[in-house]
Image (cartoon, rainbow, N blue to C red):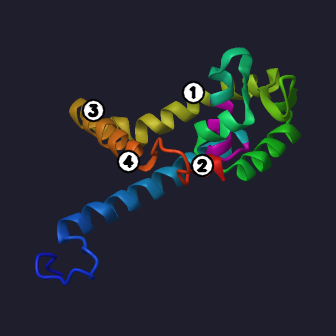
Amino acid sequence: MNTASAPADEPQWLTAEEQRVWRAYLHATTLLEDHLDRQLQRDAGMPHIYYGLLVGLAEAPHRRLRMTELAMQAKITRSRLSHAVARLEKSGWVRREDCPSDKRGQFAVLTDAGLEVLRRTAPGHVTAVRQALFDRLTPQQQKSLGEIMQIVAEGLQPNEAGADLPWLR
């Protein structure tokens, strides 16, 4: 559809090239997420999102984060995080601790067993990421992809109060 002649109340439809780029993005990200999910399910019995939570905790001081911080870092709702942490607790990889300064707050803490599963799983995961993404791109393409994804992420994560972000739901 020609966007130049569309009435003011018509949506600004994607051009053929924009549609091609959009569909390529959807196709690639869906396949990449599935590829990484299958690798982590096979190697550690966990989905990619759980692996990301364990990594976030491993990189945090004292291997612990407030649940709200972990939800923000993972870009997921607090409800989804609570469910994920419950599953990780059952595996013995994470435990919850009450926050002494805020009776309603809790910390998620990476256990020694959780750190060990990361140590065992990380080599296979980084190989899967490298083979699926970075080995296919030139250094310039990698740089461009990083810059593009940063612009998109910044545009979707406004700083103003009342923003509709997953970890605030």
Q: If you read the primary sequence from the N terminus, does the residue marked by circle 2 or circle 3 appear first?
A: 2
Residue found 82% across the figure and 33% down from its top = 106
Element type where label 1 sits in the image:
helix
Point out the frontmost of discs 3 and 1: 3
Circles 4 and 1, Cβ within 8 Å, touching? The answer is no
Say whether residue 121 is left or right of residue 17: right
Q: Nearer the viewer, residue 80 or 117?
A: 80
Estimate the x, y position of residue 153 in percent, counting from the top left. 41, 44
Seen in the picture, residue 26 relative to 41 is either above or below; the reply is below
Say whether residue 159 is left or right of residue 43: left
Residue found 43% across the figure and 50% down from its top = 156
Q: If you read the primary sequence from the N terminus, does the residue marked by circle 3 or circle 1 appear first?
A: 1
Estimate the x, y position of residue 148 in percent, counting from the top left. 30, 42
Marks 3 and 1, how far apart at CA: 23 Å
Point out the frontmost of discs 2 and 1: 2
Q: Residues within 10 Å of mark 3 (few under 14, many from 20)?
A: few
Marks 2 and 3, how far apart at CA: 25 Å
Circles 2 and 1, Cβ within 8 Å, touching? The answer is no
- Quadrant the N terminus occupies: bottom left
Residue found 63% across the figure and 42% down from its top = 40
Estimate the x, y position of residue 5 in percent, counting from the top left. 11, 82
The dot on residue 169 is none
Q: Mark 2 is on which residue type? A: Asp
Marks 4 and 1, how far apart at CA: 33 Å
Q: Which residues lie in the magenta part?
A: 45-55
Element type where label 3 sits in the image:
helix
